[in-house]
Amino acid sequence: MFNGLALGALLALIASGLTIIYGTLGVLNLAHGAMFMLGGYAGWVAYQHTGNFLVALIAGALFGLILGVLTERLIIRYFYSRPPEDQLLVTFGLGIVFVETVRFFFGSLSKTTTLPAWLNGTTALGFMYYPTYRLVVVGIVAAALLALYIVLYRTRIGMIVRAGIEDSGMVDALGIDVYRAFMLVFGIGAMAAGFAGIVNAPVVSISPDVGEAILVQTFVVIVIGGVGSFPGAILGGLIAGEIISITSVFNPGYSYVMLFVAMTLVLVLRPYGLLGTAGRE
Amino acid sequence: MLALIAAPFVLPHLGFTSTTINRILVWGLFGIGFDILFGFSGLLSFGQSAFFGTGGMIAAYLLTVMNLSNVTVAVFAGTIVAAIIGYLVGLLALRRTGIYFAMITVAIAEVFYFVEFNPLSRFTGGENGLPGVPQPSLWLGFTTITFGNDRLVYWYLAACYFIGMVIALRIVRSPGGAILSAIRENPLRAAAVGHNIHSYKLAAFVIAATYAGFAGGLLGLMQGFMPPDAFAFDTSGQLVMQTAIGGTGTLVGPLVGAAVWLYLSDFLQTTLHLGAAWKLVLGLIFVLLVWFLRHGIVGALVDLWRLATSTSRSKPLEAAKSDPTPVANAPVVQFMPAAQRPSSDGNETILRADGVTKRYGGILANDQVDFAVRRGELRGIIGPNGAGKSTFFKMLTCEVPPTSGAILFEERDITGFNITRVCQLGLTKSYQVNQLFNKLTVRENITVAALSKRGPFRLDFLRSLRSVRGLRERVDETLELVQLTGRASFPVSELAYGEKRRLEIGLALATSPKLLLLDEPLAGMSPRERIQTIELMKSLNAGRTMVVIDHDMDAIFELAQTITVLVRGRVLVEGTPEEIRRNSAVQEAYLGVSEAV
């Protein structure tokens, strides 16, 4: 159960990043998995240099933010007016470029991140002992999600973003620079992925290919939760995390199959996702 | 064909090894199906590896573990299983469109990958794959030809590719192929002219899966080994990239893309010794191509060729534009297929709406509208902006369901039907805002609409458009009627606004409706275009029942026998033009006097 919670929280964070980008910009970022991977590497490099895990966390998040902002400004912006297939193709290509760049500099072998001692033990929960770090993961991810929620629903920029989701042309006409908001959203979305990347790094070692599986899981999360829905991403993430971890107890080979079964059920019973609404494609 | 024969003699001199050439053919064949799915139907799937792998594994399993000796049978078995799985996966993935579809295909393909690796590894060899797949051979009844070396395998694969290409060409030129292109351009309108778009998309998905399964089987034969990574996400990704590099919507694009991809990967790795970085280079090339060369290499060549030959083509366009004599002077063609003639009984009701109400949240768009149209009538509907006219039309064609009330078409309750079924029954409309198939030509647009006569769905993917009986006549008649015969070969994007409006009516007309609804056919027209279109509507009414919404009072008063006035979602009054003209309530509604009362 708790393993599932940690994984689910991570998936929820990554999926939220993907879903707010899609919801606002209408772009499905196929490079999102690669951004998750890059966040992990950025944090790992920072950790190697400073030995401070907090610095690593900040580095992962910051790197994601900068990467997202640059990607939006230099590439994605020119694809808003093009058909969605082009957006998929270009982000898919970008993902490959990111992965192969990392492979070029760091090699294909996986890197492990050893936690500082105070995070590495187990904690007594009264009824069981549990790895401290996984509890910490749940905590920091929850904090990150809360921060995301506050930014989206309680600030001026969040209001612009949510208005942009409804009708970006209108927001533009009201004299608000929608593109600046878009750039920020892409940055925040990528930051969520990058941050998740470094948070996840100590749990499983990182390699250039780590983002691919995560991306697929994130898609399932979003299909389950409903595209463009922030609460849906969180709910979907938690469900997917539980499914994967519970199945893994019995037979890890079937975790994908079960995830797929869940997705199929949702598609048949609620085609727009658990918390999605009709009309958003 | 010539290129296929010449390839093994030319390409080795350019640095292609014979294995590479064979791989290109397999990927090219794989890509033909994908191009029908993506390039022609607009469905971008990132999950084709599932079918590629399935077809290959089944064929390899039959040939190695089961010791089946007939290679052809094994490959066909694999292809058929892949097609069946494609059907099942398509049922699920096509529940949604756009990016949802892309995400679902990714997820499903990943499941196949894991299933192949874990639960089914006993059959598939897990990460080792299935070695020992025999060389291709052809059993001819009396003797068996074995294709022993790479050269001979090439001829085997080239023959397979050629057959695949011939079939694909037939598919894209078939009625079903035309409808797939229309679905890509405008799914809403494709459904509205009476096509069951879901079935057509599913058919395209199965076609793509079939090609994938076939190519997968050939991959095993070619390599003598069925690799498990045929199932990997990378396989789907490589296919997508090769197709985009070569050019979508061209059928040969994937082959060209595969040649570029495989050649560069060989070249970068062996000649430039880039090692693992080859994929980085190819990734960069891919991003740049998507960015700047939208239609890939083949598409760019086609564009270049068009540019070179465009001088001859642009002339008639100029001539048509500068021609000062209005087309309205052309004699109006009488278009009256016998089946469309009104029955002798002029008082029969063709459409009835009983107490139709539509609520959008707190807004009442239509409130208890009772409405009836007699066969052969030309009815006008007028009303101020926001009176609920368009909403009413949408409910009549079952685009949106009414909140309450019933709609009867030819005595049949059609409430809750979908727009495709209603069109098949003979009720369709032209849209207030043009809903055309923009990249298709005028003739193709009309053809797609006229094809609805075949029924909502037919599996005639191997039939040529020319062999559809009566299609050409119906298309020509419709073109002449909406006065677009001279523009038939132009893509919609090159038409003037008035011409697009007429094409919009032509699309509805080509479905041979018994009842035609026109939603503001005159909106935004220049005076000359307006006169032309009024004439058109007059000629249309000679043989069919029509309901016209417009703000152009003069036109409606001139055309309609009966006029219904809608105000604030209700029927205010109904009567002859003369009665409406004199009705004080109508004048108040338009001049706003009633607000002051």
Image (spheres, grey):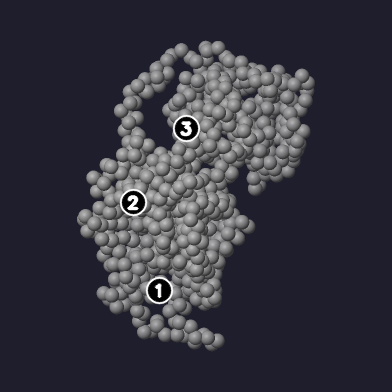
- Mark 2 — on which chain does it sit? B
Kindly report which numbered mark, 2 or 3, lies closer to the viewer in this rendering. Answer: 2
Cα–Cα span, label 2 and label 1: 44 Å
Q: What residue type is labelled 3?
A: Leu
- Residue appearing at x 40%, y 19% in the figure: B316
Residue A62 can be seen, yes or no: no
For the C terminus of chain B, the quadrant is top right
- Residue sitting nearer the eye, B544 or A162: B544
- Mark 1 — on which chain does it sit? A
Residue at numbered disc 3: B440
Residue at numbered disc 1: A204
Q: Height in image: B301 above or below A70?
A: above
Percent of width and height locating residue A44: 32, 72
**What is the crowding at mark 3: few (fewer than 14 residues within 10 Å), some, or many (at least 20)?**
many
Q: Height in image: B458 above or below B43?
A: above
For the N terminus of chain B, the quadrant is top left
Q: What residue type is labelled 1?
A: Val
